[in-house]
Image: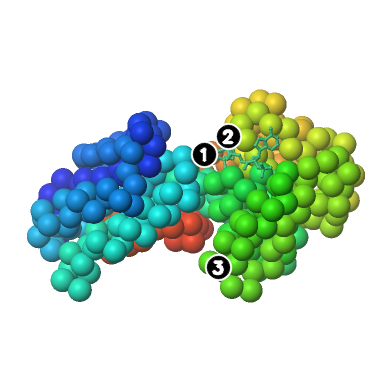
Amino acid sequence: MSEKPTILVQLDTDALPSVFDRVVAVDAGVQHIFSYGGVTPQNVMPLVHGCIFTRGGKDLCRTAIFVGGSDVTLGEAVLAEVKKHLIPQYGLSVSLMLDSNGANTTAAAAVRAAGRHLDLSRAKSLVLGGTGPVGQRVARLLARAGGNVRLGSRQKERAEAVCAAIRAHAPGADIEAVSVASSSDAPLALDGRNLVVAAGAAGAVLLPKKLRHACKALKVAIDLNGVPPAGIEGVELPDKGADRDGHICYGALGVGGTKMKVHKAALHKLFESNNAVLDVEEVYALALLLP
Ligand SMILES: NC(=O)c1ccc[n+]([C@@H]2O[C@H](COP(=O)([O-])OP(=O)(O)OC[C@H]3O[C@@H](n4cnc5c(N)ncnc54)[C@H](OP(=O)(O)O)[C@@H]3O)[C@@H](O)[C@H]2O)c1
């Protein structure tokens, strides 16, 4: 067992590395955090070499890389490039985690909450704000679970592009793009849905109460927007399985508590080996292990 201090190398695609991610790392007990901003696939190689060529094989499990920033697509590209510069055949590898915009940890917590009330392999869900980093990951997990997923956007072509990307990760995924551009679109998008997850931009109302009430099949409503007004009207920020008009509701704080636990559990996992890769599926698996 190595006694070297733990080092988390934070590779952030934004100019200023996320304070949120640094604070969570400190609270998870990471001993040193090296933070780099403006990281791109083009400039990441020397940062990876700095990780793998410094400590001996048995100590490399005490160094790990966290990829963050507000752009999940760029984060994915950085993660892919980081993998290229590891040399696992000689043991020169460190564990990796992707959580751009908190998308993986938030999505894992939200889908875990939904799965407490619904059989996700048969669920009929609608993800509003599905083109954002968080919504994309929620939809990917729901699609992987096997249910039917509708991914909503004000621009259907954007939703279609995200659905195609999700199908690439989850072949056979039962996922379709729906427009939510006009008030007449919403009833069609909601028809037959027993789960709605709103992952829209902060402060944007995506589902008014009237439409929620009209959705007869709806059982679970999860709103991830933490900035009032609520993304799903009538859901309160701290809701955690609250009954609101016959719907089981979760608000951003209700999900956020679990998100923080998932994030810390994932950071702990990084230092158990030097070869873990934690993207949304692996983070969700950790979420399911939480008490
Ligand atoms: N609870 C937690 O622990 C936690 C953690 C992280 C994030 N969050 C929250 O999760 C939500 C999603 O985060 P994100 O970063 O993925 O969001 P985002 O990228 O800012 O927005 C997601 C989508 O919302 C839609 N949208 C934007 N402005 C809108 C408007 N005025 N009206 C209706 N739709 C609008 C857009 O989709 P289209 O243009 O395609 O329609 C956009 O792609 C945010 O509210 C964020 O604050 C919560």
Question: Which label lies toward us, 3 or 1?
Answer: 3
Q: Which residue is mark 3?
A: 168
CB of residue at label 1: within 8 Å of ligand 1? no
Badge 1 crowding class, 10 Å Cα cut-off, few under 14, some 14 to 19, many 20 or more, is: some
Q: Secondary structure at mark 1?
A: helix
Q: Secondary structure at mark 3?
A: helix
- Nearer to us in this view, 38 or 94: 38
User: How far apart, in angstroms, are the residues tagged by discs 3 and 1?
Assistant: 31 Å
CB of residue at label 2: within 8 Å of ligand 1? yes
Give the residue type that dot 1 points to.
Gly
Badge 2 crowding class, 10 Å Cα cut-off, few under 14, some 14 to 19, many 20 or more, is: some
On screen, residue 117 above or below 264: below
Which comes before the other along the chain, label 3 or label 2? 3
Q: Which residue is mark 1?
A: 257
On screen, residue 234 above or below 112: above
**Marks 3,2: beta carbons within 8 A:** no
User: How far apart, in angstroms, are the residues tagged by discs 3 and 2?
Assistant: 32 Å
**Marks 1,2: beta carbons within 8 A:** yes
